[in-house]
């Protein structure tokens, strides 16, 4: 049987789009607002702070790897950031191809490899909507080794550097997704890492139109109804029927954008017997009708 985590990685088809080495010294801060692009950061040396949205700052240290599958507003700074009123710094390009934040006349206190990746699957938006908002991996020996290899390659000027670096970073992304299945907050990846739950999840994804019940899914997982419900809710973070609804609505949003408002067709493709029942469920879940959603401009 195929490893379900391998299936997720295969579906996502991760690819590196852009990367750069950034060093920093003294108090520094940079804020960015991306239009939903996947962002990653590997800490090659030193330490820094990452703040995503309104969450508490996350201290990063050497060997850490962070993936934000759908990044919007976030900031990175020194461990002791400058005052809130201070202007954000623009990076200075150095002769060696790196970029510097903060003091130029001091040795770097942090060296980061940052950049954007892409998920090339046509269904990537569906999967990304079910991934953790932030994947942070620390203390994984394999991943730390990869971070070191990426750092060495990024600073070298050997032939084929860009090709080797791109492949190393892609492996790093895959390792981060693997590791997050155990260490991340509850979600799709953790559920897929559970052999029993993976059977039920795969069946839901394979046959989204089936009239699933908790009892039927429990049979797929070879668990009692109560054991399945508790185990699924703890691993995935939502109850089985809530997860199925989320998956159906994610797919419906994707289909509505592509099919420009053929509500009845979309309803049938996500398991609803009538357009009206689908419209009520969609409006309650998304906050607007399917037709309005299909015609509204994308937000990312």
Image (tube, rainbow, N blue to C red):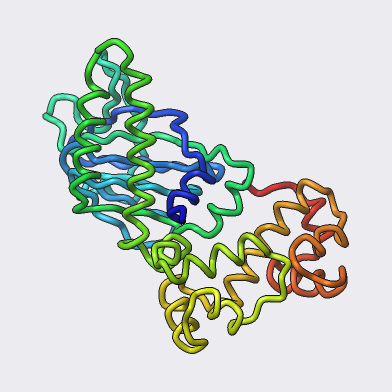
Considering every residue shown, the one lying at the far left of the view is 107
Considering every residue shown, the one lying at the far front of the view is 1
Please determine whether, in this image, residue 121 is positioned above or below residue 16. below
Please determine whether, in this image, residue 201 is positioned above or below residue 14. below
Please determine whether, in this image, residue 40 is positioned above or below residue 179. above
The residue drawn where x is 48% and y is 62% is: 188
Front position in the image: 196 or 18: 196
Decide if residue 182 is on the left or right side of residue 45.
Answer: right
Q: Position of residue 164 (x, y in %)?
A: 33, 22
Q: Quadrant of residue 120 in the image?
A: top right
Considering every residue shown, the one lying at the far top of the view is 159
Q: Quadrant of residue 142 in the image?
A: top left
Decide if residue 15 is on the left or right side of residue 86.
Answer: right
Front position in the image: 227 or 130: 227
Q: Position of residue 279 (x, y in %)?
A: 82, 69
The residue drawn where x is 62% and y is 47% is: 123
Tally of numbered discs: 0
Front position in the image: 101 or 262: 262
Q: Position of residue 16 (x, y in %)?
A: 44, 32
The residue drawn where x is 85% and y is 60% is: 263
Q: Position of residue 146 (x, y in %)?
A: 24, 37
Considering every residue shown, the one lying at the far bottom of the view is 226
The residue drawn where x is 82% and y is 51% is: 295
């Amino acid at each position: 049987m195929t490893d379900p985590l391998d299936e997720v990685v295969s579906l996502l088809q991760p690819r590196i789009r852009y990367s750069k080495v950034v060093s920093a010294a003294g108090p520094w801060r940079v804020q960015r607002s991306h239009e939903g692009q996947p962002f990653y950061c590997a800490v090659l040396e030193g330490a820094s702070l990452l703040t995503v949205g309104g969450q508490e700052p996350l201290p990063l240290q050497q060997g850490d790897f962070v993936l934000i599958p759908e990044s919007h507003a976030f900031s990175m700074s020194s461990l002791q950031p400058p005052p809130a009123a201070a202007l954000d710094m623009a990076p200075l390009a150095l002769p060696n191809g790196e970029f510097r934040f903060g003091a130029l006349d001091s040795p770097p206190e942090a060296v980061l490899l940052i950049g954007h990746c892409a998920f090339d699957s046509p269904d990537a938006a569906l999967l990304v909507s079910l991934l953790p908002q932030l994947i942070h991996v620390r203390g994984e020996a394999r991943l730390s080794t990869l971070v070191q290899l990426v750092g060495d390659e990024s600073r070298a000027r050997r032939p084929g550097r860009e090709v080797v670096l791109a492949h190393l970073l892609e492996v790093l992304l895959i390792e981060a997704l693997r590791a997050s299945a155990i260490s991340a907050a509850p979600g799709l990846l953790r559920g897929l890492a559970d052999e029993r739950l993976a059977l039920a999840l795969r069946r839901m994804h394979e046959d989204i139109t089936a009239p699933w019940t908790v009892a039927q899914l429990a049979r797929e997982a070879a668990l009692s109804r109560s054991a399945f419900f508790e185990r699924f809710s703890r691993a995935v973070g939502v109850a089985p029927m809530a997860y199925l609804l989320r998956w159906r609505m994610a797919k419906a949003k994707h289909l509505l954008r592509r099919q420009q408002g053929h509500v009845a067709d979309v309803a049938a493709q996500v398991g609803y017997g009538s357009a009206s029942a689908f419209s009520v469920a969609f409006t309650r879940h998304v906050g607007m009708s399917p037709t309005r959603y299909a015609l509204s401009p994308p937000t990312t």
